[in-house]
Image (cartoon, rainbow, N blue to C red):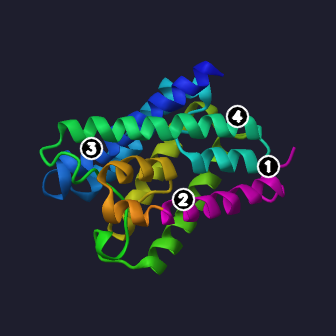
Amino acid sequence: MLKKFAAELVGTMVLVLFGCGAAVLGGFDHVGQLGIALAFGFAIIAMAYGIGPVSGCHVNPAVSLGVFVAGRMSARDMVIYWIAQFIGAIIGAAILGMIAKTGFASLGQNGFDAGSPGGYGLHAALVFEIVATAIFIIAILGVTGAKGHGAFAGVAIGITLAVIHIVGIQVTGVSVNPARSFGPALLVGGQALSQVWVFFLAPAIGAVIGAAFFRLKLLEPEA
């Protein structure tokens, strides 16, 4: 389990550093929304093949929750994954803050209303994060299942995350990952930290919804 803990910590750190780093260090003026979306997607692809053989590369508490609800991991392992993921996200955000010219003032945090890149409100944030997380979990559980496409799972998951970002960056900055939201919010504080509850609640709901399709065998392939 120590190896899995280390893998999830490192993987989540990389996701936050590269994904949020693209937003903070590259930004809309340089890499643009597409570039930021691809950074998150490519980071997942890299980690899927780098740490996937060790831990499955969840790097996301919502993913671990979905895997648990689907009956593919124990509650004990899920909690251990969560701890590693939150620690990794904080470390990734801290490294980014030490690099960025703005320091810890902006770390690619998620938000709604004034915290939303496009000025979207709470209702839009909740709907987007719930639906996007459910879709993400369905893609992950489908491609990693017994009849999934194992060798291409990382690519499929990374592309799904990139598409979610292309659609949703203007809404919330895209979370679908409580750890990814918490790391930057903890260090930025203020509005980001006061709004982070949305990015715990909505991804959790979405993860349960997505996983329920597999728990109820509605999306499980025929034997």
Marks 3 and 2 sit apart, C-alpha to C-alpha, by: 21 Å
Disc 3 on helix, strand or loop? helix
Marks 1 and 3 sit apart, C-alpha to C-alpha, by: 38 Å
Marks 1 and 2 sit apart, C-alpha to C-alpha, by: 30 Å
Label 3 sits on what residue type? Gly
Instruction: Write down the residue under mark 1.
Output: 221
- Residue 2: assigned label: none
Q: Nearer the viewer, residue 57 or 105?
A: 105
For the N terminus, give its image quadrant: top right
Q: Of marks 1 and 3, which one's residue comes earlier in the chain?
A: 3
Secondary structure predominantly adopted by residues drawn in magenta: helix
Q: Of marks 3 and 2, which one's residue comes earlier in the chain?
A: 3
Viewer-side label of 1, 3? 3
Q: Of marks 1 and 4, which one's residue comes earlier in the chain?
A: 4
Per the image, is 7 magenta? no
Q: Of marks 1 and 2, which one's residue comes earlier in the chain?
A: 2
Start-end of magenta stretch:
197-223
Q: Are marks 1 and 2 in contact (CB under 8 Å)?
A: no
Per the image, is 219 magenta? yes
Q: Where in the figure is residue 178, as x and y percent of width and height? A: 51, 52
Disc 4 on helix, strand or loop? helix
- Residue 200: assigned label: 2
Label 1 sits on what residue type? Pro
